[in-house]
Amino acid sequence: DENWKLVLVDLAGSEKVEKTGAEGRALEEAKMINKSLSALGIANHIPYRDSKLTRILQDALGGNSRTALLCCCSPSVSNASESLSTLRFGARAKHIKASPRVNCNEDKYSKKNEAFCPDKDESCKRILNKLKESLDIEDVKLLEELFILEGILFDPYSVEELESSYEDVTLRTISSLQAAVEELDLLLRRIVAAERLDVLHKESCKNSNVLHKILSAFSFFNGWGQSLLSGG
């Protein structure tokens, strides 16, 4: 028996009290908002009890979920400080690593089904062993970093996602390398073409010098012949 939960939260922006001029109840609300956002901005370890906001979002931020964060910035120059703070908040939130899994309620039916399902831990170990056999430890770490850069969750306990993500990242890496090779090939062709033009230019300069010498010699002999004819 599987269950899901969808949480949609519209967070208020972090505002400077001196700009808004809030007083009384509005001032207290602004303080609580800023405190909640500060608690939410601690990405590596989330202290759920420090704020009602993080307590409400505990299931969404606890690692067993897919979480998306949209940061909205103002284009106005007067709000540049707030926009910078929002971007820094988003940059910190990017360090959150989640490992979503299917939520299953354990009952007598699910326990019966588990008897017919293969052991995912064993399958996971086999896949990781294959990766370690074909790749070094540094390569596995690099693969994990590629997963994170591509926005893919590196979850060793999710066998299906690990297999598909491995293939996806491999294809993306190969395509990126192919694109880089094509760019290098194009650059090499341009360099070779430039060198050929330089060689042709040098050869043309040499040929023009030889031609100039030939014309000078021809002019000299022509003048010498004319002088002989006139003298004769």
Image (tube, grey):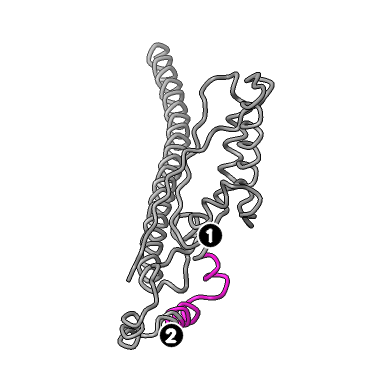
Give percent across and percent down for residue 95: 57, 53
Residue 70 in percent (x, y) is at 47, 40
Tell me: 194 left or right of 90: left
- The percent coordinates of residue 208 (x first, y second) are 44, 29
Asked if disc 2 and disc 1 are in contact, CB closer than 8 Å, the reply is no
Q: Is residue 47 above or below residue 212?
A: below
Can you say which quadrant of the picture contains the N terminus?
Answer: bottom left
The residue shown at (64%, 36%) is 34
Provide the secondary structure element on which disc 2 rests: helix
Q: Is residue 120 above or below residue 178?
A: below
Quadrant of the rendered image containing residue 44: bottom right
The residues colored magenta run 125-142
Q: Residues within 10 Å of mark 1 (few under 14, many from 20)?
A: some
Q: What residue lies at 61% left-to-right and 28% top-to-bottom?
A: 15
Above or below: residue 130 compared with residue 161: below
Is residue 168 placed above or below 221 in the rendered structure?
below
Magenta-drawn stretch, dominant element (helix, strand or loop): helix
* Disc 2 target residue: 122
Q: Position of residue 226 (x, y in %)?
A: 39, 15
Q: Amino acid at mark 1?
A: Gly
Query: Which residue was labeled with disc 1?
Result: 62
